[in-house]
Image (cartoon, grey):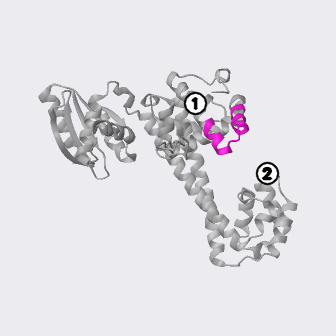
Amino acid sequence: MLYAGIDIAKNKHDVAIIDSEGTIFVRHLEITNNSEGFQHLKQTLDNLVQVTGDTVQVGLEDTGHYCYNIISFLRQNDFAVFSYNPLIIKEFVKSTTLRKTKTDRKDAMTIARKLMSDVDKALFEANPIMIELKYATRNVARITKELSNQKVQYIRILDIVFPELVKTLGKTNSVVETQNVYAVLKAYPAPTELANANLRTLTNILEKHSHGRHGRERAIKMRDAAKITVGQNSPALRFELLQTIDAIAYFSDLKNKAAKQVTTLMRKINSPLLTIPGISYNLASIILAELRNVDSFKSPAQILAFAGSEPSVSTSGQNQVETGHMVKRGSPQLRYALNQAARGCARTSPTMKQYLNKKLGEGKHYNVAISHVVKKLVRVIFRMLKYNDQWDESKLIVNQ
């Protein structure tokens, strides 16, 4: 068997190839990240297969989006491809040497040796539908971030041009982030225009875009507040407000369409995670996309470590404090999804809710108590994915 390790980069990839005995066939081959480079790699692998009569397996680090094209190319040409989390390669390096050296050549050789040493390589086989799910979930995350940024700018503009609006309608910013308020501000983007608006027209706009929930009463409040506002009547800010409202509508539409794509993929996968109370398609998809293959993890503790949801431990000499802040390394997307899933599960699952209350009753801060729920939920998720089990409330134990 031949083992090819590829160190992935943006513009080029480094390749090393060894056999089952550790004999080096290719110490270092640099290929460009384009069709010519990919064909050079294929020709090299084909020649070695022909000369040695062996089959070849290819391993690489899952370093962001740079690896996806070469994974697709190799799979199309019938090569077995295995994808490693960079943290796994890092730990493998620590177990083989005390020297701290890192070069692209050495990394490629390290990956090849890691691939050679693994008995059950199926744990790291690149799954096409999980790659698709990761594309889709990351797309939703980026759109959500853009939408959030636009809403921040929207509130900033209102604070300048119409600071009384939030207090008039409610106590939080969310009250002005509704379709009926957007519609009014698009029709009357300056307080001077709103102050002189026809009450019947203003009422009709509110009734139409709130489906009858708001009408004349809200119209009077908004118009009266506009008459006494201390906000600036700036044409530039008026223009920016209109553009920002359009941007919010645009990104909201994109987010809905992207979320539908995720839902479609999740229905194809039909994961048991969807049976967990309080976990939506969105959260379940992020968890699956980030974990990709639960068999890559030996225990729930490894998942916690990968998500960065485990407390740091530092015991030395007289310092024997074993609890600390969350390490927050690994996947921030997975950490977010697990945290939100734990909150949702603690609201809807009687056992999880009782467990959360138990930790709160012990005097723990809410965030610390939620971290315990995360730990418990990860143990459940690990078993569900490992054995394809459905959620079973009766199997949960509060004290564990």
Q: Quadrant of the N terminus?
A: top left
Q: Secondary structure at mark 1?
A: helix
The x, y position of residue 127, in whole percent, is 41, 32
Per the image, the residue denoted by label 2 is 211
| Residue 269 appearing in the image | yes
The span shown in magenta is 354-373
Q: Do the residues under discs 1 and 2 have CB atoms within 8 angstroms?
A: no
Give the amino acid at mark 2: His
Q: Quadrant of the C terminus?
A: top right
Give the amino acid at mark 1: Leu
The x, y position of residue 343, in whole percent, is 66, 40
Q: What secondary structure is the stretch in magenta mostly built from?
A: helix
Per the image, the residue denoted by label 1 is 273
Of the image marks 1 and 2, the number of the one nearer the N terminus? 2
Looking at the image, residue 314 sits to the left or right of residue 219; the answer is left
Q: Residue at x 62, y 77 (%)?
A: 236
In depth, the one of 339 and 51 nearer the eye is 339
As drawn, the residue found furthest toward the left would be 51
Report how far apart the C-alphas of labels 1 and 2 lie in the structure.
Answer: 35 Å
